[in-house]
Amino acid sequence: MALSCRDTLILIFQRLTVADLARASCVCKVWNSVATEDDLVVSAFTSPWRIKELVGRPASGSFWRDNGIWKFAISHRIRRGDSVTSLAVKYSVQVMDIKRLNNMMSDHGIYSRDRLLIPISNPEILAKTTCYVEVDKHAKREVAVLYLEGAPKREQDVSGMNQLSNLSADGKRRLIESLRRSMQVDDGTALYYLAIAEGDPRSALSEFSADLRWERQAGLN
């Protein structure tokens, strides 16, 4: 029979990794209710990197399943004279890693953007910092972003799903269901495009259509 004392479970679960918490959540309802508590999950996600604070919550709970260093990135605001090569040198990372993270087909992609996400090369840089959970519209993924020059300029930069916060659970479900039928995709994919479109269903459909066109042009579909 599984241990069911919440206080004892909390003491035990505080020592678990994110992967072990995910496994514990599958044991029974009591373990699930404890293992999925925000404080425990966030602590398990950030503690290996000694992060002081994680601001914002992800659009999908799957974000918490993996806290590898690739889930974090530095936000670099593009300045005159910047190039992918110069940024790779500045941050001691590979050019291809920057391009891969930012979904860039060529170096020229830098000129159409306000910023680039830079992979973390030295985990020590995360110690005692504040990171912000964001959906980057170019990277098309949720990332815990570190701003070396302070916080994001706009509050709305944090978490692309803030626009949905005023919707009821039923309203959000109907919106995702409508997008799922229109796109002919699963719920996770519909939620993903809704996130990168900052909660705007029309923009979500536009982003999805643009990706389909790109896949056809690239011979991936």
Image: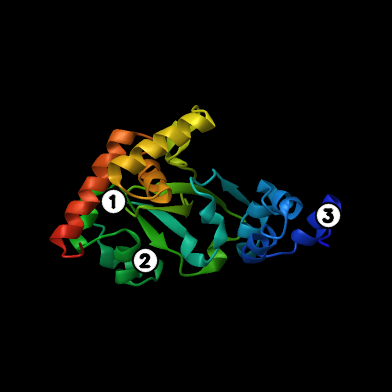
Precedes in sequence: disc 3 or disc 2: 3
Specify the label residue 165 is tagged with.
Answer: none
Indicate the quadrant containing the C terminus: top left, top right, bottom left or bottom right: bottom left
Q: Which residue is mark 2?
A: 90
Q: Which residue is mark 3?
A: 4
What is the C-alpha distance between the residues marked 3 and 2? 51 Å
Specify the label residue 79 is tagged with.
Answer: 1
The residue at the point 38 percent across, 71 percent down is 93
Q: Is residue 175 above or below residue 95?
A: above
- Residue 73, image x and y in percent? 45, 58
The residue at the point 28 percent across, 51 percent down is 79
Callout 3, which amino acid? Ser
Is residue 154 visible in this depiction of the protein? no
Mark 3 or 2: in front is 3
Does the residue at mark 3 contact the one at mark 2 (Cβ under 8 Å)?
Answer: no
Q: Residues within 10 Å of mark 3 (few under 14, many from 20)?
A: few
- Residue 42, image x and y in percent? 63, 52
Nearer to us in this view, 4 or 63: 4
Which element carries disc 2, helix, strand or loop? helix
Does the residue at mark 2 contact the one at mark 1 (Cβ under 8 Å)?
Answer: no
What is the C-alpha distance between the residues marked 1 and 3? 55 Å
The residue at the point 50 percent across, 27 percent down is 166
Which element carries disc 1, helix, strand or loop? loop
Precedes in sequence: disc 1 or disc 3: 3
Callout 2, which amino acid? Lys
- Residue 81, image x and y in percent? 23, 56
Callout 1, which amino acid? Arg
Precedes in sequence: disc 2 or disc 1: 1
